[in-house]
Amino acid sequence: ELNKELSRKLEVQTQRLELLTAQSMAIDNVSPEKQPDSHAVQERPPIADEGDEVVERVLGWIMKMFPGGPSKRRTSKLL
């Protein structure tokens, strides 16, 4: 049951992140003459920060599901 709930939450967050990414790409693809000035980029929401938050949540869920932690062999490859 916990696994189903975590999977559902992960799917929701993934869809949300995909939407934000698509919106960001759409904003980036607007031609320069349509952008009034360089301030348009600064007005966008901080996509990277939200993505980091999602990653932290997902890692937390994974660590709860697998409390033993990663094997030593895998850890060295990830670093």
Image (tube, rainbow, N blue to C red):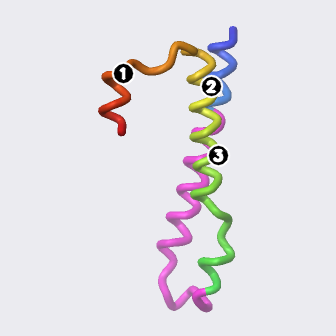
**Magenta region:** 12-38
Q: Mark 2 is on which residue type? A: Trp
Residue 49's x, y, as percent? 62, 56
Q: Pick the quarter of the image with the C terminus.
A: top left
Q: Does the magenta portion include 68? A: no
Q: Pick the quarter of the image with the N terminus.
A: top right
Q: Nearer the viewer, residue 63 or 31?
A: 63
Above or below, 77 relative to 66 = below
| Label 1 environment density (alpha carbons within 10 Å; few <14, some 14–19, many ≥20) | few
Local SS, label 2: helix
Q: CA–CA distance between discs 2 and 1?
A: 20 Å
Residue shown at 59%/15% (left/top)?
Answer: 65
State the residue position of label 3: 53
Would residue 46 appear left or right of 25 to someone viewing this image? right
State whether the magenta stretch is mostly helix, strand or loop: helix
State the residue position of label 1: 72
Q: Nearer the viewer, residue 44 or 56?
A: 56
Q: Mark 3 is on which residue type? A: Glu
Residue 34's x, y, as percent? 56, 87
Local SS, label 1: helix
Residue 11's x, y, as percent? 60, 31
Q: Quadrant of residue 22?
A: bottom right
